[in-house]
């Protein structure tokens, strides 16, 4: 029973063997999360059940391999857990194949690269400085070190991807893998158009839906599975599960490069992906995290999850409008999803200054490069904000103008400690009675 009890229970309080140093820090972090306004677009608050599954005895179990095909004994229970996670994920996205073992989104993307590419092959990804992700070809990441990369970006005028230009670059560069998806792009994706050019040049499309996964699962954004061969995601952003990754396909297919099994049969992409995860790039799966993923997928299948996701979008749209009303520039002018990128250059403040001032008032955002940024990645000209976490806390669109007003007050008075202290008090008042857990 001991590790089914959450860390913040009476049991822990009275346990004389408790590691006070660590558990005191966890308690302080919990208070920080409770008292502040969390606007980091990639964060969320998991349910108590997700938390309990992660802190369970499943962490003790080695289970290299896949369910019913393990390299260790005693896996009969974790097999059931992992099968449940896979089946729930398949139902959630209406797909036929999934691997729930990647430890993170980066691990998932690494496994796809290992399954689909040889070192030196060409990939085409969304420019990191325009909102893309490190694992989509950045020179400081494995994706940029191992492969020849080219990038598409957004247009300076519109802040949006021009799909004709993307197709033009694809035709010129002839990548083997085209990666769609972003860390900071507030518009939906035109997967169908990219599929046409991918078919033309014989490329595979990977859609990394880590950010909007919850919105896609609830059919509030375009469906990538219809047009993209492989889809990866993290499980902890809009999907509101534990920190981790998954790889998915709606339809399995014969690998187009003729890779064969030892018996001479052409290998399916699912087999290549499974072996790219284990033994290709990971050892033992984190079965406690897989159990928590299963719990989160179960929660995402409930009707309340769609209501939540709709509120995430409503809150984000109202937030973008409120910023625009106050003279802030939102890249692309608005949002279709849970996030937005604010260009602060017109307000004469850097992303770093904005992040620091807001954190002092317990409003958490992250500094972020904006397209065509003139500052370094350590300073930046923008901040990224998102609504998944505050929406989980129960914030509705009627409270968004007040939040934007508080942010504006901090940014316009970034060096005034008195005003920042006043805003911090207002932040605490707003968040004081809101629950940390949605379920
Ligand atoms: N760190 C993630 C994000 O914040 O979007 C990307 O890996």
Image (cartoon, helix red, strand yellow):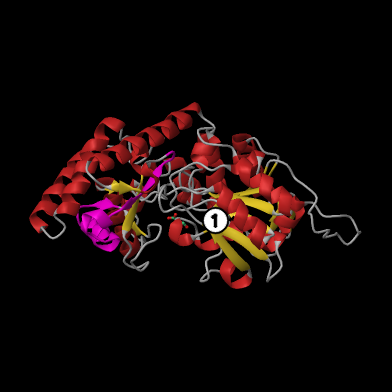
Instruction: Relative to 39, say whether 143 is above or below.
Output: below
Q: Is mark 1 within 8 Å of ligand 1?
A: yes
The picture places residue 312, in percent across and down from the top left corner, at 39, 36
Q: Is residue 22 above or below residue 403?
A: below
The residue pinned by badge 1 equals 105
Residue 430, position as x, y percentages in the image: 21, 39
Question: In the rendered image, is residue 149 in sight?
Answer: yes
Residue 401, horizontal then vertical, whole percent: 23, 36
Q: Regarding mark 1 in the picture, which secondary structure is present there?
A: helix
Residue depicted at x 65% and y 60%: 172
Instruction: Indicate which quadrant contains ligand 1.
Output: bottom left
Q: Nearer the viewer, residue 433 or 178?
A: 178
262 horizontally vs 412: left or right? right
Specify the segment rendered in magenta: 336-364
What is the residue that sits farthest to the right in this orientation?
263
Residue 208 shows in this picture: no
User: Can you say whether 394 is above or below 374 in the image?
Assistant: above
Residue farthest toward the top in the current orientation of the protein:
303
State the image coordinates of residue 207 (x, y, percent, origin top left): 59, 49
Which residue is nearer to you in this view: 36 or 134?
134
Which is nearer the eye, 288 or 7? 288
Question: How many numbered badges does the structure rendering display?
Answer: 1
Where is the C terminus found, in terms of image quarters? top left
Magenta run includes residue 30? no
What residue sits 27% from the left and 57% below the top?
345
Residue drawn at point x = 63 percent, y = 34 percent: 91
Q: Does 351 lie within the magenta span?
A: yes
Toward which corner of the image does residue 106 lie, by quadrant?
bottom right
**How many residues crowd around disc 1 within 10 Å: few (fewer than 14), some, or many (20 or more)?**
many
Q: In the image, 157: left or right of 356?
A: right
């Amino acid at each position: 029973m001991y590790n089914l009890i959450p860390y913040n229970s009476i049991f822990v309080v009275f346990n004389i063997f408790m590691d006070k140093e660590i558990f005191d820090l966890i308690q302080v972090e919990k208070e920080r999360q409770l008292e502040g306004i969390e606007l980091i677009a990639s964060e969320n608050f998991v349910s108590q059940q997700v938390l309990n599954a992660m802190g369970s005895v499943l962490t003790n179990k080695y289970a290299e391999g896949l369910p019913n095909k393990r390299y260790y004994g005693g896996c009969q229970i974790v097999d059931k857990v992992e099968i449940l996670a896979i089946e729930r994920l398949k139902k959630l996205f209406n797909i036929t194949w999934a691997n729930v073992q990647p430890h993170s989104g980066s691990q998932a993307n690494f496994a796809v690269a290992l399954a689909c590419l040889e070192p030196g092959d060409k990939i085409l990804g969304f420019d990191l400085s325009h909102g893309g992700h490190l694992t989509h070809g950045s020179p400081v990441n494995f994706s940029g070190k191992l492969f020849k990369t080219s990038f598409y970006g957004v247009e300076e005028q519109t802040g949006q991807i021009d799909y004709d230009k993307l197709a033009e670059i694809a035709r010129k560069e002839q990548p083997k893998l085209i990666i769609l998806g972003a860390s900071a792009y507030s518009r939906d994706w035109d997967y169908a158009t990219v599929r046409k050019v991918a078919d033309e040049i014989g490329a595979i499309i990977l859609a990394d839906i880590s950010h909007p996964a919850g919105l896609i699962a609830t059919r509030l954004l375009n469906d990538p599975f219809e047009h993209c061969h492989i889809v990866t995601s993290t499980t902890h952003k809009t999907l509101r599960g534990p920190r981790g990754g998954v790889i998915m396909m709606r339809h399995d297919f014969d690998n187009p490069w003729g890779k064969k099994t030892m018996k001479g049969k052409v290998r399916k992409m699912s087999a290549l992906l499974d072996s790219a995860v284990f033994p290709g790039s990971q050892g033992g799966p984190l079965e406690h995290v897989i159990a928590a993923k299963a719990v989160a997928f179960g929660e995402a299948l409930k009707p309340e999850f769609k209501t939540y996701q709709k509120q995430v979008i409503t809150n984000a749209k109202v937030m973008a409008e409120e910023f625009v009303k106050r003279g802030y520039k939102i890249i692309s002018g608005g949002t279709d999803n849970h996030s937005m990128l604010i260009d602060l250059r017109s307000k004469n403040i850097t992303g770093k200054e904005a992040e620091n001032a807001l954190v002092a008032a317990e409003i958490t955002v992250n500094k972020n490069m904006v397209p065509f940024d003139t500052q370094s990645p350590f300073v930046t000209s923008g901040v990224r904000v998102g609504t998944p976490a505050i929406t989980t806390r129960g914030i509705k669109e009627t409270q968004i103008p007040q939040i934007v007003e508080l942010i504006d007050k901090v940014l316009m008075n970034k060096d005034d400690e008195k005003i920042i202290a006043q805003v911090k008090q207002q932040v605490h008042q707003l968040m004081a009675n809101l629950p940390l857990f949605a379920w």
